[in-house]
Image (tube, rainbow, N blue to C red):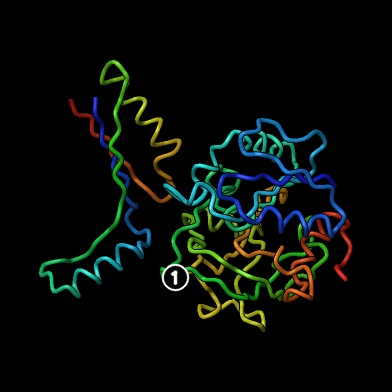
Amino acid sequence: MKAAVVTFPGSNREGDVATALRQAGATVTHVWHADTELPAGTDLVVLPGGFSYGDYLRCGAIAGRAHIMDATRAHAARGGYVLGICNGFQIACEAGLLPGVLARNANLKFVCKRQHLTVERADTAFTRAYAKGQVIDVCIAHGEGNYIADPETLARLEGEGLVAFRYADADGQVTAEANPNGSLNGIAGIYSPGFNVLGLMPHPENLIDSLTGGTDGRGMFESLISGKKAA
Amino acid sequence: MKARVTVTLKNGVLDPQGKAIEGALKSLGIDGVGSVRQGKVFDIEITAGDKAAAESALKDACEKLLANTVIENYRVEIGA
C-alpha cells in the first residue's frame, strides 16, 4: 500500500497520520499542495487535519482548489482511495469529492475531547478490521464539524448506506447529548458512492498507541493496509 | 472598475454566529432588533474591460470559490 499524504499550508496532522500509516505497514510519501501529480503507484491519498490557509474564507475552501486536488479527484474517479480527516474532510467536501458542508459547530464551541463513534458498516476498505455496530473511542478537535446537507442528499446518504460513523455515547446510542457539534443524524463521517473516499471529523490517527491513550484508531489503518484485525 | 460581492447564508441554514450576535445586541439593550444573519462582503477591483466581462468573471469567482452554493447565496454589484 503506497500512501501519499498531502501537506497544505497550515496542515498540522500530516506527521501523525504518516506514523499511523507506517505502523500499519504502508509506504508513505509526503506530497506538497502545489504538486500537480501524485507519486506513481499511489493507492491512497490522505488529506490530513489542520488549519489549511488559516481556515480563511471557509474551512477547506482554498485548499479544496489546490493543484494537487485535480490529481486527487482523478485518482478518486479511477476508484483510488482517499481519506480526509478533520480539515481533510472539510477539504474533500469543498473539492466536491464528498457532498455537503461542515458548518460552524451549533454550540459555537471548539470541541477537543474523547468521543465515541459507532462503526456503521464493516464491509469497506476503511473499516473491515472493525465489527459492524462496534463502538470506538477516538478524539475530536474541531470548531466546524457540523455536517449539513440538503434533504435529498441526506436521504441518499442514508438510503445508500454511505454514513461511515456516527457520534454516540459509550453504549453506542446515537443521541442529541452525544452529538458534539449539531451534525445531522449524528453524522461523523461519510463515504462516496463507490466507498473509495471517506471523510470524517474524528482523528483515528490519535489513537494508535496505548502509551498515548488507546488503540481504537488503528483499525482504520489496519483495514486499509492489511485488512486484518488490529491487535 | 469596482465590484462588491455579498455572500449570505441561505434561508433555513442554521447561523449560530448570527444568533450569538443577535443575543449580544439584545443584551446591549439595543431596541428593535428582530434577528441577525451574518454574511461576508468582498470588495474586488476588476481589471476586465467592460461590465459584461466583469459580470461573467465575478459569477465564475462566486461559483468556484467565494460562495459554497450548498449553503450560501451570493449577490454581485458592479460600480464605476
Type of the residue with mark 1: Lys
In the picture, measured across the screen, residue B21 lies left or right of residue A27, that is left
> Which residue is at a point 40% across and 33% down the rendered structure image?
B61
Residue B67: x and y in percent read 40, 43
Between A128 and A47, the one lying in front of the other is A47
Front residue of A229 and A155: A229
Locate residue A119, reporting x and y percent.
71, 69
Work out whether residue A138 or residue A121 is closer to the camera in this orientation and state it: A138
Numbered label tally: 1
Relative height, residue A167 to residue A200 (above, below)? below
Q: Report if residue A146 is visible in the image.
A: yes
Crowding near pointer 1: few (<14 within 10 Å), some, many (20+)?
few
- Give the structural element (helix, strand or loop) at label 1: loop
Residue at x-position 41% and y-position 51%:
B71
Picture quadrant of residue A222 = bottom right
At 54% from the left and 43% from the top, the residue drawn is A63
Side of A135 relative to A49 (left or right):
right
Left or right: A44 in relation to B4: right
Q: Residue at x 53, y 37 (%)?
A: A65
The answer to whether residue A124 of the structure is visible from this angle is: no
Q: Position of residue A161 (x, y in %)?
A: 66, 59
The chain containing the residue under callout 1 comes to: A
Residue annotated with mark 1: A109
Q: In the figure, is residue B31 to the left or right of A213?
A: left
